[in-house]
Image (cartoon, grey):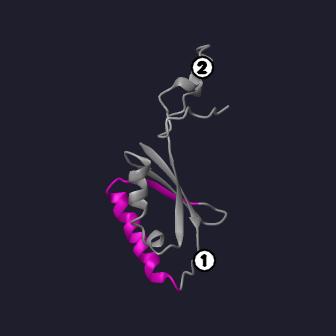
Amino acid sequence: MQILALERELKPIDSRRHAAVLREEAARVWALKKEAVIRDIWFTVRGRCAVVMLECSSEDEARRHLATLPLVREGLIAFEVLALCSYDGFERLFTSEDSTRGACRPETGNPPASTG
C-alpha cells in the first residue's frame, strides 16, 4: 500500500545547532530508502517540509517507520499519514452506477469521500 506522509515542524530546526541530528536523519532516510520502505522523498518549495511516499502494509506500519527518524524522536517534526488507493473516478465515464463502491476504503470502514 502506498502511504503519503506530510511533515509538519513542531519546533524550529537550526541547521547549526541540530547538525548531528540532521546527519542522523539523512542516514536513517537512506536506510529506509534502501529497505524500499521509502519509495521517494521531496521537500516543498514553500516551507521546506518533507513529503514522503512510503510502501507499507498499513498506516500504522508507516507511522512505526517514521517514528524511527531522529527528528521525530527528538520531537522536532511530526507527520500526517495518508493511505492512498488508485483513482477509480474514470469508472464514471463508463457506468451509471455509483463509482464510490470501488476497492478504496479507509481503514475506519467509512465510505470514501467523493473526489469530484
From the image, which quarter does the C terminus lie in? top right
Q: Which label was assigned to residue 73?
A: none
From the image, which quarter does the N terminus lie in? top left
Q: Which of 17 and 45 is in front in this view?
A: 17
Q: Name the residue under label 1.
A: 12
Q: How many marks?
A: 2
Residue 98 in percent (x, y) is at 60, 19
Calculate the distance from the C-alpha at mark 1 to the C-alpha at mark 2: 46 Å
Residue drawn at the location 57% of the way across and 81% of the way down = 14
Query: Which type of secondary structure does the marked residue at label 1 adopt?
Result: loop
Task: Please tell me whether residue 35 belongs to the stretch shown in magenta.
Answer: yes
Q: Which amino acid does label 2 sit on?
A: Asp
Residue drawn at the location 62% of the way across and 18% of the way down = 93
Residue drawn at the location 52% of the way across and 86% of the way down = 17
- Of all residues, the one furthest to the top in this rendering is 96
Q: Name the residue under label 2.
A: 98
Is 108 placed left or right of 64 in the picture? Answer: right
The answer to which of marks 1 and 2 sits earlier in the sequence is 1
What span is in magenta? 17-43
Task: Please tell me whether residue 48 belongs to the stretch shown in magenta.
Answer: no
Q: What residue type is labelled 1?
A: Pro
Image position of 93 with respect to 41: above or below? above
Looking at the rendering, which quadrant does residue 33 occupy?
bottom left
Is 25 placed left or right of 51 in the picture? Answer: left
Image position of 74 with respect to 63: above or below? below
Is 30 placed left or right of 3 in the picture? Answer: left
Residue 64 in percent (x, y) is at 39, 58
Image position of 97 with respect to 14: above or below? above
